[in-house]
Amino acid sequence: MSLSSRVFAILEDNTIVKLPNNRLSKLYKFDKNTSFSEFKNKKIKIAMFLIELKDRKPYNILEEFYHYYEFDKKGRLDENKFFEQMRLNLDSGVLMPCGEKGFDSNVIDGTSIFYKNRIEAQYQWFPSAILKNDMHVQIFK
């Protein structure tokens, strides 16, 4: 078995648009020639799925991620917002609660909790059951 990904943009009217992996790769590299004109100056819901393939066909969804991406006036990924989001994701998962005494401390470091809450408030969204089902249908068709 092998792995693949599927990425969708969810438009304001809940239309599901499949985003090609090759364009996304260029978008993540901030290629100046790659843009999505329909996303100009918008905050777009992005759904990412890690898919297990069997005989080159989708077999199982392993992971699902739901984020907002902000696009600039040219339809390119807003670099500052993207890196802020990535920094928050790293900070929320990498920072380990640890007091002066180390892991045996009674001190609770709420930094990672604060970052996770900020990510959920600013950069994550959660689909309705109907929308989630519609995306799953797109993956397996």
Image (cartoon, rainbow, N blue to C red):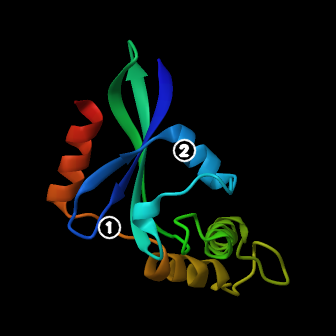
| Residue 2 position in % (x across, y down) | 50, 21
- Circle 1 sits on which residue? 126
Q: Which residue is drawn at 44% across and 74% down?
A: 43
Q: Which residue is drawn at 27% across and 53% down?
A: 16
Secondary structure category for the residue under label 2? helix
Residue 21: give its label: none
Q: Nearer the viewer, residue 101 or 69?
A: 69
Picture quadrant where residue 63 is located? top left
| Cα–Cα gap, marks 2 and 1 | 24 Å
Disc 2 to disc 1: CB gap under 8 Å: no
Picture quadrant where residue 35 is located? bottom right
- Circle 2 sits on which residue? 23
Q: Residue type at mark 1: give it.
A: Phe
Using residue 49 as the reference point, say whether residue 88 is left or right of it: right
| Residue 108 position in % (x across, y down) | 66, 85
Mark positioned earlier in the residue sequence (2 or 1): 2
| Residue 96 position in % (x across, y down) | 72, 70
Q: Which residue is drawn at 57% across and 80% down?
A: 113
